[in-house]
Image: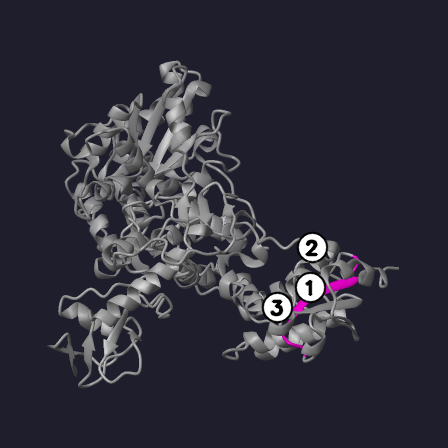
Amino acid sequence: MINLKINNIPVSVEAGTTILEAAKQIGIKIPTLCYMKEINEIGACRVCVVEVKGARSLVAACVYPVNEGMEVFTDTPAVRKARKTTIELILSNHNKSCLSCDRNMNCELQALSYEYGCDLNAYAGEQTPSEIDISTDYLVRDNSKCVLCRRCVATCKSIQHVAVIGTMNRGFNTSIGCAFDADLAETSCAACGQCINVCPTGALTEKSEIDNVRAALADPSKTVIVGTAPAVRAALGEEFGYPIGTNVEGKMVSSLRLLGFDKIFDVNFTADLTILEESHEFIERVQAGEHLPLITSCSPGWIRFMEYYYPELIPNISSCKSPQQMFGACVKTYYAEKMGIDPKDIYVVSVMPCVAKKFEKNRADQAAAGVQDVDAVLTTRELAKMIKANGVIFNQLPDGEFDAPLGEYTGAGVIFGATGGVMEAALRTAVEVITGEKLDSVEFEAVRGTQGIKEATYKVGDLEVSVAVASGLENARAICEQIKNGTCKYQFIEIMGCPGGCVNGGGQPIQSSFVRRNTDIRALRAKVLYEIDANSKVRKSHENTVVDTLYKEYFGKPGSHKAHEVLHTSYVKREKY
Amino acid sequence: MKKNTTIPFDGTPEQEQQLRAVLSKLKNVPGGLMPAMQQAQDIYGYLPKEVQVIIAEELGVSLAEVYGIATFYAQFALYPKGQYKVAVCLGTACYVKGSGEIFDELSKQLNIANGEVTPDKRFSLDATRCIGCCGLAPVMTINDEVYGKITAKDVAGILAKYQA
């Protein structure tokens, strides 16, 4: 152990600990901007500087390791002055349109400016020229708000192994961008949106569809139907001051009612439907012995990544549409017919923890009724923004209930939002269908948890089924490489584009880097979903009574011709460059 | 900022073979990217997208990374040099004597930015550091020809000498 003093308080820490981490142990939060533990430790922004007795100059606490007998001072006049100057210099090259910025009141640069009493115009001068990139369906890059912390670059490279953004040019012309100044739409970006979640400012945001949704809600000729993804209810509360890991399903439904949606359904319902189609597909492939392993298709970020980097795996991917797309498809076919509404007059909005869903809704082969299955996708953040802007007093709302019929869901449907959830839900159904016997326990613990890759083998009747679950594209890549080089021993694989699955999706509420490194957000949000599952009376997708009705009245049976027309889709090879 | 010229790539199969030989040697060498880019530039004279893509694929890094390095170091060129290499000294003495305006005028007349080449590959334009003849400031050079004590108004006349 290393003994040192921080602000005259003795502290003992392991060798190799940084001053930043040591200070946290005595309850001091040293401010940071560029720092992300283990992902981006570059000491670039100089906001974390501290005084070390005997050192020639101030040092960057985020990368400076402690020494025996060291004396550190984190809050001297020299330290405060240096930090303030640094922040003011960053502000001198920052588009300070803070009042209406998407990240107003949730911006790390704004918080620092406030804490250090910065003069916003201390250093007036030229600003690095930049253009806003709105080329994609899902993301907006505004470099005028970029502070060059490189947290997005590090995330794209080290966590997602995609690395379509990097640091370009040098000096005053340094910018974050794509190779050859290409628009993001011209690159092999997977659309996961993890870069948005780590951006300290408003430089990276989703492409908002709030205006489109408002226009549809104001149009009397449209029946506007909304569906919510599992993970939204596990995180939306954070935008209204609830602790991370609070289930706000009831208040979410009530607020959607107040926003004026005609019907409030649940995408959990089509998660259940996905399981019926996908487990049928799995059993079929096992019996035929072809196109194994079967890989899940719920995550549009993963699918887009696969289409760019591993298109040879297309035959292995489940042809099932994602729950979002099945939702839109069912609303515009089955429900429209049942209610006698022309699908053209239905406007389907999905609320998603995801920005890749915005891209997915515009894909080809996603129009079961001849019109696009889903018309607009709102992220969890956008929904929160609408709720606030409409004056809905979220915290005071009573718990509401989803509408019938497409609002019923089972415990299996809701766990889709956490890594391993789709696998567990599929196993609950596949095992019972294959063996014809009731499961003693519906809990498949080995596929739960936030590890990047999980694996398990289950005995299903006479079959040994080896499964793997991967989340985050770095882990997805590892699995894909196994398949490519012939060492893959699995028959069924679940892959989610974001680390931890949808609960940690690119459309979820943004937590500061301090919260992110000191809290396991993924686990806390996932716990909400597993609790809902544990408390559900029905926990198997094939026991969802509305799904059952849907097959009886409309699709016949899983994998039927009609089901294929409405609920399945196709993929394309995409060129990287 | 968007680059505004595009030059068709005219690399030969021999050049590609040379490049791939270099890359296969540097594939698993830590820190191999910089020497790979330097040798690629020796082979092609510059680093067009086609070459950067091969480097990225062979060394298992992303194109954004290769491009980031190519734009960080002044030694790397994204465009080939022209038949006439126009260079303007932006060193301190030339700059205070107005070489910035000369550079801007050249950029306007040739319709290319720093480091670029005209689509017919006749002229390329580079801003340089001090070239050591401050007594002639402001100075521009075209290949080995030196033009000293000039103003922005002289640019059109000088360029005219090199037009076909």
Q: Secondary structure at mark 3?
A: helix
**Per the image, is A475 magenta?**
no
Percent position of residue A353, x then y? 33, 43
Residue A259 in sight: yes
Callout 3, which amino acid? Val
- Quadrant of residue B73 in the image? bottom right
Q: CA distance from mark 1 to mark 3?
A: 29 Å
Q: Secondary structure at mark 2?
A: loop
Question: Label 1 near label 2: C-beta < 8 Å?
Answer: yes
- Of badges 3 and 2, nearer the viewer stands 3
Q: CA distance from mark 2 to mark 1?
A: 9 Å
Instruction: Identify residue for label 2.
Output: B5
Q: CA distance from mark 3 to mark 2?
A: 30 Å
What range is drawn magenta here? B120-131
Quadrant where the C terminus of chain B sits is bottom right
Residue A290 in sight: no
Instruction: Identify residue for label 1.
Output: B79
- Of badges 1 and 3, nearer the viewer stands 3
Q: Residues within 10 Å of mark 3 (few under 14, many from 20)?
A: few
**Residue in the foreground of this view, choosing between A334 and A129:** A129
**Per the image, is B125 magenta?**
yes
